[in-house]
Image (tube, rainbow, N blue to C red):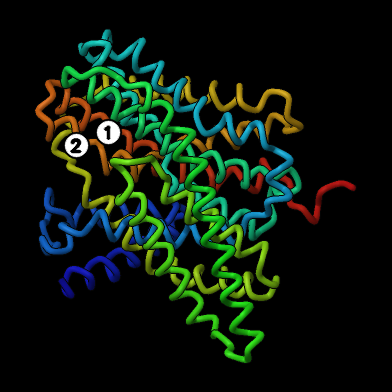
């Protein structure tokens, strides 16, 4: 395992540095590293690492979500309330509709199989999007109109919506019937996740204040450990309650971090954000190298040009969905185009659920996995590069914003 971790960190950072020197996003180097080190190419990663790959990816995602929550300004987010809600479901619905309409003709599958494929491909990748939005917030681009906050909020809920739809369509493909509760679970998991996270954040801030009042100062490094531990607990609650009631653990983590930002003094939340930013340096490498390792490139050749054209058509539909969400806002055409670009990347969810239909023995399993792999390889670098190149040109920096 230690040898595998050495490969992940050293090769991942080296390839990221190479891509950075070529003016490409670092994520591309990490994804390529994962593909090369993974079981489908050089097979240099220990099976023990691969067996806990999903848990390690989830831990890395928790770290950046905490950083995101500590960077969010809820006052700014209130300015874009309606679009944030729409962005959590409308773009994914448009993309799923594209697969439902065109995939049967282009890929030769049934309507139901097309719906399963659309649900797999419909999720935006928070692992790609959220770190970049945090960076953009730190650089104060687009913050006057809360654009990165809008995208972060939408991307955080988008995955929940898509995964619930995926579960429903897979059940139908296996011969089951959709249940009303499956659709009720979407808003329920969002609301319960926010409530649970807010309660945890309030109790945590109360603990820190009480300790400080009694002259038991808790060091910032210790606070980071406590916050991380509680975040892992919130994710575990989602698993414990999955057969009883739907709760979004990821949203609970973000809500906890937001509550800490509100309740704690500014210098405390700022220091915590800086600490998690440093942790992200290592977590980012683990996350994207292991996402790359989950990609089986053997399936890409079989998918071919029809799959690529289907992905591009679906992205056009997704872009129309984003633009629809932004109707009536004060965003200009450049800012709206940036939102479309920021909603392109796919990686984490596709790597996690792309192989599920195949493992269930569904007839569409092979083609769904092939298109999911191609979706990652096309959209993750395209979206990451698009965000990195477009935000300085399309967004206004807060200091330069006309008063």
Is residue 281 visible from the viewing direction of this image?
no
Q: Mark 1, mark 2: which one is toward the viewer? A: 2
Question: Helix, strand or loop at disc 2?
Answer: loop
| Residue plotted at (49% across, 40% down) | 190
Q: Is residue 271 above or below residue 58?
A: below
Would residue 177 be seen by someone viewing this image from the given angle? yes
Front-lying residue, 100 or 66: 66
In the image, residue 262 above or below residue 80: below
Q: CA distance from mark 1 to mark 2?
A: 8 Å
**Sequence-wise, which precedes: disc 1 or disc 2?**
2
Q: Residue furthest right?
A: 403
Kindly give the residue lying farthest to the front in the view shown.
244
Relative to the observer, which residue lies in front, 97 or 140?
97
Question: Which picture quadrant has residue 263?
Answer: bottom right
Residue sitting at x 33%, y 24%: 118
Disc ID at residue 92: none
Q: Which residue is mark 2?
A: 355
**Residue 138 position in % (x across, y down):** 64, 60
Image coords of residue 230 (percent x, y): 43, 66
Q: Residues within 10 Å of mark 2 (few under 14, many from 20)?
A: many
Quarter assignment of residue 360: top left
Percent position of residue 280, x then y: 44, 66
The residue labelled by disc 1 is 372
Whether residues under marks 1 and 2 lie with C-beta atoms below 8 angstroms apart, the answer is yes
């Amino acid at each position: 395992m230690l040898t595998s971790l050495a490969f992940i960190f050293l090769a991942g950072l080296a390839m990221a540095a190479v891509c950075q020197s070529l003016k490409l996003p670092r994520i591309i180097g990490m994804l390529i590293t994962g593909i090369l080190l993974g079981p489908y190419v050089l097979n240099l990663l220990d099976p023990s690492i691969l067996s806990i790959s999903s848990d390690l990816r989830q831990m890395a995602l928790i770290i950046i979500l905490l950083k995101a929550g500590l960077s969010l300004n809820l006052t700014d987010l209130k300015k874009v309330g309606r679009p944030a809600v729409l962005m959590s479901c409308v773009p994914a619905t448009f993309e799923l509709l594209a697969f439902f309409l065109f995939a049967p003709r282009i890929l030769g599958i049934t309507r139901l199989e097309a719906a399963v494929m659309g649900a797999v491909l419909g999720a935006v990748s928070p692992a790609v999007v959220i770190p970049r939005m945090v960076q953009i917030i730190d650089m104060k681009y687009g913050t006057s109109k809360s654009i990165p906050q809008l995208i972060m909020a939408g991307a955080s809920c988008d995955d929940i919506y898509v995964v619930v739809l995926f579960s429903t369509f897979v059940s139908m493909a296996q011969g089951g019937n959709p249940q009303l509760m499956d659709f009720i679970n979407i808003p329920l998991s969002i609301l319960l996740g926010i409530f649970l996270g807010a309660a945890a954040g309030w109790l945590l801030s109360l603990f820190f204040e009480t300790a400080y009042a009694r002259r038991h100062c808790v060091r910032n490094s210790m606070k980071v450990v406590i916050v991380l531990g509680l975040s892992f607990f919130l994710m575990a609650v989602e698993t414990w309650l999955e057969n009883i009631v739907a709760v979004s653990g990821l949203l609970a983590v973000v809500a906890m971090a937001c509550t800490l930002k509100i309740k704690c003094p500014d210098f405390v939340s700022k220091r915590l954000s800086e600490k998690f930013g440093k942790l992200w340096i290592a977590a980012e490498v683990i996350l994207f190298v292991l996402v790359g390792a989950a990609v089986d490139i053997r399936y890409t050749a079989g998918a071919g040009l029809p799959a690529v054209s289907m992905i591009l058509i679906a992205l056009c539909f997704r872009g129309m969905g984003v633009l629809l969400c932004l109707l009536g806002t004060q965003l200009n055409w450049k800012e709206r185009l940036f939102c479309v670009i920021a909603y392109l990347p796919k990686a984490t969810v596709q790597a996690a659920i792309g192989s599920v239909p195949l493992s269930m023995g569904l007839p569409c399993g092979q083609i769904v996995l092939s298109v999911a792999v191609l979706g990652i390889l096309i959209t993750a670098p395209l979206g990451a590069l698009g965000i990195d190149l477009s935000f300085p040109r399309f967004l206004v920096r807060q200091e330069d914003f006309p008063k």
